[in-house]
Image: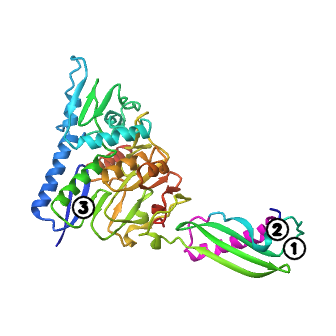
Amino acid sequence: MTTSTPSLKVLAGTAAGLAVLAGATACAPAKQGSPTAEVSPTGGGSSAAAAPATPGHYKDGTYSADGHYTSPNGEETVGVTLTLASGKVSDVQITTHPTSANTQLFQGRFAGGIKDLVVGKSVDELDVTRVAGSSLTSGGFKDAVEAIKKQAS
Amino acid sequence: MTGTLEFDAIGTRWWIRAGGLSEELAARVRERIEEFDGAWSRFRADSLVSRWAADWDDRVPGERTLALPAEAAPLGRLYRELHELTEGSVTPFLGDSLVRLGYDASYSLVPHGPAIPAPAWGTEARWEGSTITASAPVLLDIGAAGKGLLVDLVCGILSEAGLPEFLVDAGGDLRHHGPGAERIALESPFDSSRAIGVVALRSSALAASGTSRRAWGDGLHHVLDGLTGEPVRRVVASWVLAPEAMLADGLATALFFVPGAELETRYGVEWLSVHSDGHAEGSAYFLEGLF
């Protein structure tokens, strides 16, 4: 897909800009993932597939790409569709795929995945009934650990 | 009327909220927990499993059997599955390995000697139905799924009494029954005053397993690999949401050894594991709930 080479630069740049914006509005994530973009020509762009591109000049057509970034809610994806006419951008459409924890909390099943870094919030600030954690200990064990620490110091 | 019951038992803090919880019902719950502890706890010298291991007479050769209470049958079946699934890493015959590292009845927390692997399932010890058979002294440890089983037994008492809504929390392992969903925080393995996310719990069980709380100096904690007797390193915390607490508890332990996707495929459960470098892997149910 030779047409995707020049358009990739445009769209990856756009997606990266969006990722930074989205990251900023989502309350400063602890770790910003590297935005990546995959592009595929849609509509008219594909018909001009074999034409060589010159720097700074892009084939007319419609191009789509998905940008990926890491927000505090995990991996987020934003879709960008861009239309070029006479070498100029004639239309840009942004498609967001919100994955807010709150909206999904009571909904069904989604594909699994990975989050680069877990972020902690103070339990006192949360409106929750209980905390699920690693075998809360009572009495004896904690006392024993304290005793060991004293011996070691 | 919604009553809340709090008490310490089996080495952890219990919290039970139930509409229509009477004094009589609360007493029955406490009795059932005491009965369970009396059979299964390796932290009590007078328990069934402790006495069986301690009273072993080496002068009499041959295999020995231990008859356990009826609740042993489903627990044994789950352990057998977990043992296969983890290729031997999860095993109920881990008591002596834990004692070796200092996680003993008196919480000495001082290792005496190198780690020892658990007796091999089949040749040295086996669990069939509610009977344990062994050719040498074996100290049972049902830490991987026993607490979950007890939560299920307690919930069974509340259900049989006709209670329409309840939430049982056994030190961070929970089971809920009722129409409304509860919001449950996921304790951070790096700071117990913080949570890394919130998930909904409704008429199902949520079990957690982690290496941070029951830990004592120099990389020692209570989640051991039965193959080596050494503490596990990469996963530091895990959660599983399942219909019942015993399954959730056992699979949360298995997550230290088996990719969650495998458990999801086999059991249809939701899962989350947090690794020592701070990254998390999980089903979307949990990932969506992370901050």
Residue A57's label in the rendered image is 1
Identify residue for label 2. Answer: A6
Q: Are marks 2 and 1 in contact (CB under 8 Å)?
A: yes
Name the residue nearer the viewer: B270 or B210. B270
Residue that protrudes farthest toward the bottom in the picture: A90
* A30 in magenta: yes
* Mark with earlier residue (2, 1): 2
Residue A126: image quadrant is bottom left
Residue found at x 34% / y 40%: B79
Characterize the local packing of mark 2: few (<14), some (14-19) or many (20 or more) Cα atoms within 10 angstroms. some
- Measured Cα–Cα span from mark 3 to mark 1: 68 Å
**Parent chain of label 2:** A
Residue B186's label in the rendered image is none
Callout 1 amino acid: His
Q: Is residue B28 left or right of residue B107?
A: left
Q: Examine the residues drawn in magenta and state their main secondary structure.
A: helix
Q: Which residues are magenta?
A: A3-32
Characterize the local packing of mark 1: few (<14), some (14-19) or many (20 or more) Cα atoms within 10 angstroms. few
Residue B78 appears in the rendering: yes
Residue found at x 81% / y 64%: A5
Considering the numbered disc 3 on the image, is that residue within a helix, a strand or a loop?
Answer: strand
